Amino acid sequence: MNDSHDDRHQDSHEDNHEGTHEGAAKPRKSPAWSAPTGRRTDEWSECLVLIGEKQDRAAFTRLFRHFAPLIKAFALTGSTLSATHADELVQEVMLKIWQKAKAFNPEKAAASTWVYTIARNCRTDMYRRLQKFDTPLAAEDFSPEQDSEEPFMQLQSRRSAEKIRAMMGDLPADQKQILAKVYMEGRSHAEAAAELDLPLGTVKSRVRLAMQKLQVQFEHSLEAGLSQS
Amino acid sequence: MKTGREAAGRVEQATTMIRHHPELDILTEYAAGTLSLAQAACVSVHLNYCERCRRTVSQLQAVGASLFTAQDPEVVGDALLNKVLERLDDTPPLSYQRTPLSSQDATPALLSRLMAGDFSDLSWKNITRALRTTQIKTGDPQFEFSLLHIRAGGEIPAHDHRGSEMTLVLQGGFEDDRGSYRAGDFIHRSPEDIHAPRAFADEDCICLAVVDAPLRFTSWKYRWMNPFLRLQTG
């Protein structure tokens, strides 16, 4: 939780640079984190860039010591995975990070979000493997094909991620509990409702309230608007 | 070759036309990785059309990341670290290629992979004069993933759903009593919704549909077909 506070302080530098779109679009000569455009400068982004550019093993080791215990916790939370499977998942995720670090772009994503997404995909694939799904698809194939290349959009998205981290601690316990069930334990809303003995509508509205508090922006479906009126 | 600007323009154009989006709870389940495989594929295809929902999903993933980093860590010994370090040499970094922007009319890559070809390569089954369908194997044991082809101006007989139905328009468009839908639009129906979609008059319509129970015709004229509309998952 400590690094989220550091991140917020850096946020204030960003305001001066919103207009410099063309600067950010140029090929980067220096590593991204040292550029004075308010980019993320946290240790884990640095590690990922070092791994991507130089296959830096020391950086990989630092990253492992920080994230492996979180990946293991993620594997064991609310799941039937054994300790052996949890260790296997840690290895898979860390090797994926090693392989894909070049694709990490600190302008687009926080290191923690990037690592979390890989861990989520590997866990989903492991579940499906254990349940003997016969599918040609891996979880990472479901990621959208394109990210926003627009620097302004990237800035916006980094900002909202900062805000989410900062505000997470203020969520009411009942909302946080549901989010933990859904994200960490990997339960669908319906499963979460059954386990907590709550109506599905209550689960959905708590998720919605939590996302509103975290200021997650979303499109209202026109359909929902019609059917509720 | 398209220039970046042209490609961006096309995508922006596609984005602004999309008016029907997945609900927040569906996007949350997608971001948390808890949607069933076939449903996740359907949402993923919508995201290829919809920049706004992509942005929402990236925020929803940031929610997951902050829960992830706030967990109580489990002990991981040096033995595991050494095991991973030993394997690094056998795990060469992947060369990173940026996927090109797919143009508005291109079939999303995920769908092309599932279809293993083009719409015309699939074996279609006629349901009515205006409607034909084809099931696509995804490996999802619960949800059926299929394509619907509605002839221009054709109508699908009124039906409800024994389960939920996700529909995504891929080509052309259709309308029903609630609105009209074009390429990229995402429609989610619950079991009790009855509708009778009609394709636009000037173009055939191709939709992707994900259902967990077969649809059921409500009009007496087509009810006899219900036993034949069996679900094919997997």
Image: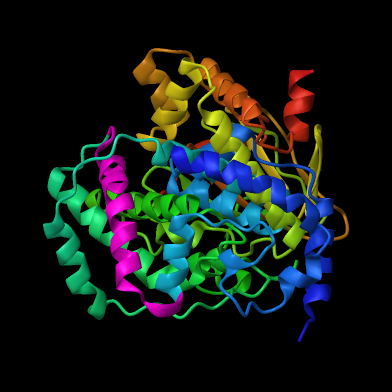
In the rendered image, which quarter is residue B60 located in? top right
Which is nearer the eye, B15 or A20?
Answer: A20
Residue A29 x, y percent position in the rendering: 62, 80
Q: Is residue B82 left or right of residue B91?
A: left
Whether residue A222 is visible here, answered yes or no, is: yes
Question: Taking B37 as reference, is B187 above or below it?
Answer: above
**At x 56% / y 72%, what residue is drawn?**
A31
Question: Taking B132 as reference, is A23 above or below it?
Answer: below
Q: Give the residue at the far bottom of this rendering.
A: B1
A63 within the magenta span = yes
Q: Quadrant of the C terminus of chain A?
A: top right
**At x 53% / y 15%, what residue is drawn?**
A202
Q: Is residue B171 left or right of residue B37?
A: right
Whether residue A95 is visible here, answered yes or no, is: no
Q: Give the residue at the far right of this rendering.
A: B202
Which is nearer the eye, B196 or B125?
Answer: B196
Q: Which residues are magenta?
A: A53-78
Residue A180 x, y percent position in the rendering: 41, 30
Residue B47 x, y percent position in the rendering: 64, 53
Q: Is residue B206 left or right of residue B93?
A: right
In the rendered image, which quarter is residue A1 located in? top left
Secondary structure, magenta segment, majority class: helix
In the rendered image, which quarter is residue B138 located in? bottom left
**At x 84% / y 67%, what residue is drawn?**
B9
A18 within the magenta span = no
**At x 24% / y 80%, what residue is drawn?**
B89
Residue A184 x, y percent position in the rendering: 38, 36
